Amino acid sequence: MKLLITGLCGFAGSSLAFELQRRIEGLEIRGLDNLSRAGSELNRGLFRARGIRCVHGDVRNPSDLEGLPRPDWIIDAAANPSVLAGAVGGVSSRQLMEHNLVGTLNLLEHAKRHSAGLALLSTSRVYSLSRLAALPMETRNGAFAPRFDSIDEPGLSSRGVAEAFPTQPPLSLYGSAKLASEILALEYGAAFRLPVFINRCGVLAGPGQFGKADQGIFSFWVHSFREKRPLKYIGFGGSGRQVRDCLHPRDLADLLARQLRQPEKAGRAVNVSGGVGNSMSLAQLTDWCARRFGPLEVQSEASNRLYDVPWLVLDAGRAEAEFGWRPETRIETVLEEIAAHAEAQPEWLDLARDP
């Protein structure tokens, strides 16, 4: 099997490349990356010894794809992964759309040309921002939890947010670009008989991730805590009660390996997440870090940040039912792996800092 992974030098792309190579015998991997993110070039040096070829190119440029050999499958892991992208910071709304939507369009044309399958890495942020923000909450052990007995929302249960939860805007510019990419990918799959998988991922986390405050929050928090750098709870009263689920990329690779072997099951979106059992609030994460590294005072800002929601945990029941998949890596293991990496690489946050 010949596999093309875009965004190869990113955390998701590189982790998936190594894990899939281990899981699928005879797999040939070629990757594409524009090396635009600080620190991503460090991963490039790891591929040669593993027989993985990395090509410097950009999914926004169709000509960068033309010279690549025919793949059997494409994994689209190239994206700007920040929910704030296009609205806050140095990335314009046009740049975001070019990365996260036009790039996917170019890959779909590449897949069409070669009759290849596509696995798109999407996000939990395709679910309606306004509906999530309106969920009534209570606090349990320093974490928000929906009052499920008073909620009547499709696709919501004590297991989390399922695929039937509303996706109408507003989402965020980032979430809208990913939802549009999902629709486009499924349309190409139906029109040109291409197997297309859509994987809506929870928060990916693990050692080697270049975490930032607006993306890779678990890694960012652990590394910052270890180095005693300033941290701040933002929004929802500044209490750190907001909750996310945590997914290790090797568990995502397990699902992808199952999907690539079963193209007949392609054609709709599935959630891929750690679920309720692998979820945690920032306050609970702080307690874990304090036990691991010693105390650190966390600052507080009560006002909410753009696009933030108090609780977002995905229900991956469809992935379990259709592929026999469930996450194997517990959140405590994920955090311990990140902590060990932080101790071994104390300069890691600086490597990911934009010049």
Image: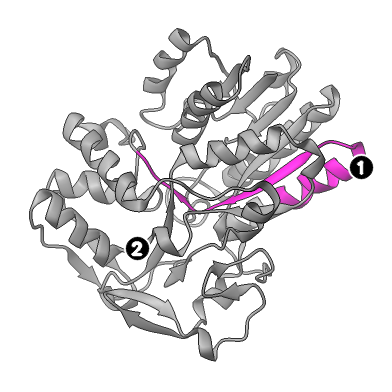
Q: Is residue 219 left or right of residue 129?
A: left
Q: Quadrant of the N terminus?
A: top right
For image coordinates 14% across by 50% down, the residue present is: 292
Which residue lies under the disc numbered 1?
191
Which residue lies under the disc numbered 2?
280
For image coordinates 75% across by 38% down, the residue present is: 105
Q: Is residue 54 visible from the viewing direction of this image?
A: yes
Question: Disc 2 marks which amino acid?
Answer: Met
When the figure is inspected, residue 259 is found, relative to residue 124, above or below; the finding is above
Q: Is residue 34 visible from the viewing direction of this image?
A: no
Q: Secondary structure at mark 2?
A: strand
Question: Disc 1 marks which amino acid?
Answer: Ala
- The way the protein has been coloured in the rendering is one colour
Residue 36: horizontal and vertical position, in percent?
Answer: 47, 29
Q: Is residue 24 left or right of residue 187?
A: left
Q: Which residues are magenta?
A: 180-206
Asked if residue 28 is among those painted magenta in the image, a careful observer would answer no
- The residue nearer to you, when weighing 18 against 190, is 18
Q: Is residue 227 left or right of residue 48?
A: left
Residue 196: horizontal and vertical position, in percent?
Answer: 76, 41
Q: Residues within 10 Å of mark 2 (few under 14, many from 20)?
A: many
**Among numbered discs 1 and 2, the one appearing first in the sequence:** 1
